[in-house]
C-alpha cells in the first residue's frame, strides 16, 4: 500500500486538527521517504531499540506516539544521527500521532479507561472520567497495577474509589487537576506526579502509573486496528524503560 494511503487512514483515526497548538509541525510524517508499505511497526517511542527492531522485521513505516524530532534543529547530535541513520539506511518512514491521538475516539485516553474497566465514560477535552463498582483504595491500586502491568506511586486520603479520571501521559497539571477536583473524582490516574501537586490535592487519590504504562496500551491497540483495517502485517514493539524501584 502506498504511504499516502496509510497517512489518510491515520488522519481519520486521529485527525491532526485535534492536536494541541504546540504539536503544530511535530505530528504526521516526520520522515517521509515516499515508499510503498508492506509492513508497519508501531511503538510509543522512536528509540534506538524500536528503530532497530523495525529494521529487523523489514518495516517500511514506524508509527509512534512521541516524535523523534520535537524541537527545531540547528545541529544534529550523535544520538539523533544514529536514530536517523537507522531509519534512512533501512528506508523506514516515520509518522507521529501525539496529542491528536490523545483526544481521538478510541485513542490514548479511551483505551486507558477501557483497560481500567471504567463504565459510563464522560469524555473531557483531554482525559476522561468513568465509574466503577466501589472498591477500597488498596484494591484499586492493585487493580491499576495489574491492568497496566506496572508499578505505581500514589498519595491521597480517599479510602473508597468509584469515580475515576484518567489522563494518559503527563496529566498532573493545574488545569486538569482542577477539573478532577471540580468533578469530585475519587481517584485520578496519570503520570509524572510532582511535589507541589502532592501537597495541594489531598482530597483525592492520585495514582502515578508511569508515562509509558498509561499511553502504551493505546499504541498496542492501534497496531491491532491497523492490521485488521489495512490488511498489512503490523507489529507492536514494546520498549518499556523499566524504571526500577527498591
Image (cartoon, rainbow, N blue to C red):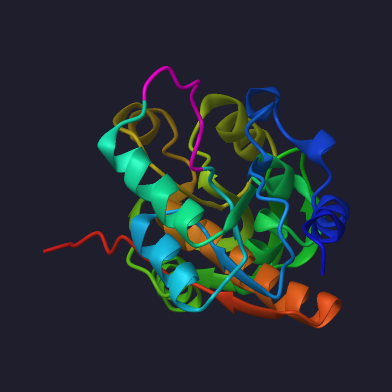
Residue 194 position within the rendered picture, expressed as x and y whole percent measured from the top left: 34, 34
Looking at the image, residue 7 sits to the left or right of residue 214; the answer is right
- Residue 95: image location, x then y, percent: 64, 50
Please state, as top left, top right, bottom left or bottom right, where the C terminus lies in the image.
Answer: bottom left
Mark yes or no: residue 93 visible.
yes
Extreme-front residue of the structure: 89
Question: Between 214 and 49, which is closer to the camera in this rendering?
Answer: 49
Spot occupied by residue 34 in the image (x, y as percentages of width and height): 73, 52
Depicted 192 relative to depicted 218: above or below: above
| Residue at (42, 17) in percent of width and height | 74
Instruction: Read off the magenta span.
Output: 68-75
Which of the 4 image quarters holds residue 201? top left
Res. 156 visible in picture: no
Which of the 4 quarters of the picture holds residue 15?
top right
- Closer-to-camera residue (15/33): 33
Q: Position of residue 144 (x, y in %)?
A: 47, 69
Count of all numbered marks drawn on residues in the image: 0
Q: Residue furthest top?
A: 74
| Residue found 37% across the figure and 69% down from its top | 150
- Image quarter where the N terminus lies is bottom right
Residue 124 against residue 3 in the figure, above or below:
above
Q: Is residue 73 above or below residue 26?
A: above
Q: Nearer the viewer, residue 88 or 202?
A: 88
Left or right: 149 with respect to 67?
A: left
Majority secondary structure of magenta residues = loop
- Residue lying at 34% horizontally and 26% vertically, measured from the top left: 196
* Residue 82 counted in the magenta span: no
Residue at the image position 67 percent from the left and 40 percent from the top: 99
Please name whichever residue, 71 or 190, is drawn nearer the observer in this view of the structure. Answer: 71
Amino acid at each position: 500500500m502506498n504511504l499516502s494511503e496509510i497517512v489518510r487512514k491515520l488522519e481519520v483515526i486521529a485527525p491532526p486538527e485535534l492536536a494541541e497548538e504546540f504539536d503544530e509541525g511535530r505530528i504526521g510524517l516526520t520522515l517521509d521517504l515516499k515508499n510503498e508499505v508492506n509492513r508497519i511497526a508501531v511503538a510509543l517511542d522512536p528509540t534506538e531499540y524500536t528503530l532497530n527492531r523495525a529494521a529487523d522485521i523489514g518495516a517500511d513505516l514506524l508509527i509512534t506516539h512521541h516524535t523523534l524530532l520535537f524541537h527545531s534543529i540547528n545541529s544534529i547530535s550523535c544520538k539523533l544521527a544514529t536514530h536517523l541513520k537507522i531509519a534512512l539506511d533501512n528506508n523506514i518512514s516515520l509518522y507521529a500521532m501525539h496529542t491528536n491521538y490523545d483526544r481521538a475516539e478510541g485513542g490514548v485516553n479511551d483505551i486507558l479507561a477501557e483497560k481500567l474497566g471504567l463504565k459510563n465514560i464522560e469524555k473531557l477535552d483531554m482525559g476522561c472520567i468513568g465509574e466503577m463498582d466501589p472498591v477500597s483504595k488498596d484494591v484499586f491500586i492493585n487493580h491499576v497495577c495489574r491492568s497496566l502491568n506496572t508499578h505505581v506511586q500514589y498519595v491521597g486520603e480517599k479510602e473508597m474509589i468509584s469515580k475515576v479520571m484518567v489522563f494518559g501521559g503527563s496529566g498532573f497539571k493545574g488545569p486538569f487537576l482542577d477539573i478532577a477536583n471540580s468533578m469530585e473524582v475519587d481517584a485520578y490516574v496519570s503520570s509524572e506526579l510532582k511535589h507541589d501537586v502532592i501537597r495541594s490535592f489531598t482530597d483525592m487519590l492520585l495514582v502515578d502509573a508511569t508515562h509509558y504504562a498509561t499511553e502504551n496500551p493505546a499504541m498496542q491497540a492501534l497496531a491491532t486496528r491497523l492490521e485488521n483495517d489495512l490488511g498489512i502485517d503490523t507489529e507492536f514493539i514494546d520498549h518499556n524503560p523499566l524504571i526500577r524501584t527498591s
